[in-house]
Image (tube, rainbow, N blue to C red):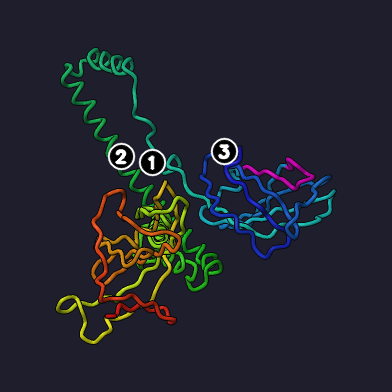
Amino acid sequence: MAKWNVTLSTTEPYNYVGMIQVRQGNKNSETMEAIVTQKGLPVDLSRCKAYLEALLTNGSAIQRAVKIIDAKNGKIQYTFDEYSMQALHRQTANIVFYQGEDVIGTTQDFSYFVVRAVSKTPGEMGSYWQTVEDLIADMVAFLNANKGDFTDWMNARKKEFEEWRKHQQDTFEAWREGQESDYLTWFESIKDILRSIDPGGVMLAELMDARVDLQGVRHESIKDRLIADLEYIYQKIKYQLDLIVYKHIAVGNKVTIEHDSEYQPEVKVTYYQDALGTELGGLDSSGNLGGGTIYNVPSQLSFDRKKTHVEMPLYYALNGSFIIYDKHTLLIVEGNKTLHFTMPEANITKAYINDDKTSLDKVADKLELLINDDYTVELKKK
């Protein structure tokens, strides 16, 4: 199984294959598979031989055989070995193709990185672990050699272990420092690549900006920002949908009107504000109690015998006085808000909200309700 799967082009100016990092000493595990393309299409490698060529940082030039595992589809495989991993840090290579003795093509250059293995660190002592049998045999030999008793043997083993532990710690720290140096060297070697991929750091800046959500809050990751934006958008949409239901869907606010008809009389419902004003005795001395724009109320009717149920949006729910202005007109008044019901085909006898019987008031005989052509309403003294 390949550790890296890449695409190598014979025509693109540069092959970016990501980070191929191989470790010295690893055998038969540092394997790369590649699709060889020309102008975006796989190259037919039938009757070809392939080789990896590289000029290493230690000055050595190598050419190593590459397997062609699917010639028709341009698929090759190469396992890095001691020759291609003999030099540390960034190495530059390409794949060359032969038919007979003739070179028929090469891929553009690509890079791989060689790091040092811990086992290759100078001064390695190997493993300290021992079996119980080994310890018993060592103790018996110690006692038989008259080097001391069990306590002396244990102290000697402790001293030996401490020396081993210190050596391992020093070795590891030296290896870590070497790896850090390797990493810094590698990073310096790919700066040009990074600059060519993201000149001026524009992509990085855009990625950082992408963490800021619609409300200007910066998040730890783009995923967190997307979740926050989705929640924000959901709440906005939910609010608008709730508002549509609240103002425009005829449900949740029912007024029942009783009448004297055996049929199913229609009801028209309108709504207006600031149509009524009050002074002493409920009458305005100016002769005009005000006026406001009339709005048609969305309504849904259902019928029982001599009853009409008017369902309206909750936005128009009023908790006020029920006034039968005349036999065809019902008003519900709460403060400066008025619901106006007109039933021209029947006489209104009673009205109530949600089956809760409500007392009715008559409009004073000295007042009359006028609806003007400009969609305003007035209540005037006769």
Q: Quadrant of residue 106?
A: bottom right
Residue 73 within the magenta-colored segment of the rendering? yes
Assess whether mark 2 and mark 1 are in contact (beta carbons under 8 angstroms): yes
Identify whether 170 is placed above or below 260: above
Looking at the image, which residue is at 51% across and 52% down? 88
Magenta part mainly helix, strand or loop? strand
Task: Tell me where residue 18 appears, x and y as whole percent.
Answer: 56, 55
Q: Quadrant of residue 301?
A: bottom left
- Amino acid on which disc 2 is placed: His
Magenta region: which residues? 68-79
Assess whether mark 1 and mark 3 are in contact (beta carbons under 8 angstroms): no
Image side of residue 35 versus residue 148, left or right: right
Q: Which quadrant, please, contains the C terminus?
A: bottom left
Residue that carries the numbered disc 1 in the rendered image: 123
Along the viewing direction, whichever of 325 and 120 lies nearer the viewer: 325
* Mark closer to the chain start, 1 or 2: 1
Residue 245 within the magenta-colored segment of the rendering? no
- Label 3 and label 2: CA atoms lie apart by 30 Å
Q: Which mark is residue 167?
A: 2
Image side of residue 157 versus residue 246, left or right: left
Looking at the image, which residue is at 34% across and 55% down? 255
Looking at the image, which residue is at 75% across and 48% down? 74
- Amino acid on which disc 3 is placed: Ser
**Helix, strand or loop under label 2:** helix
Residue that carries the numbered disc 3 in the rendered image: 29
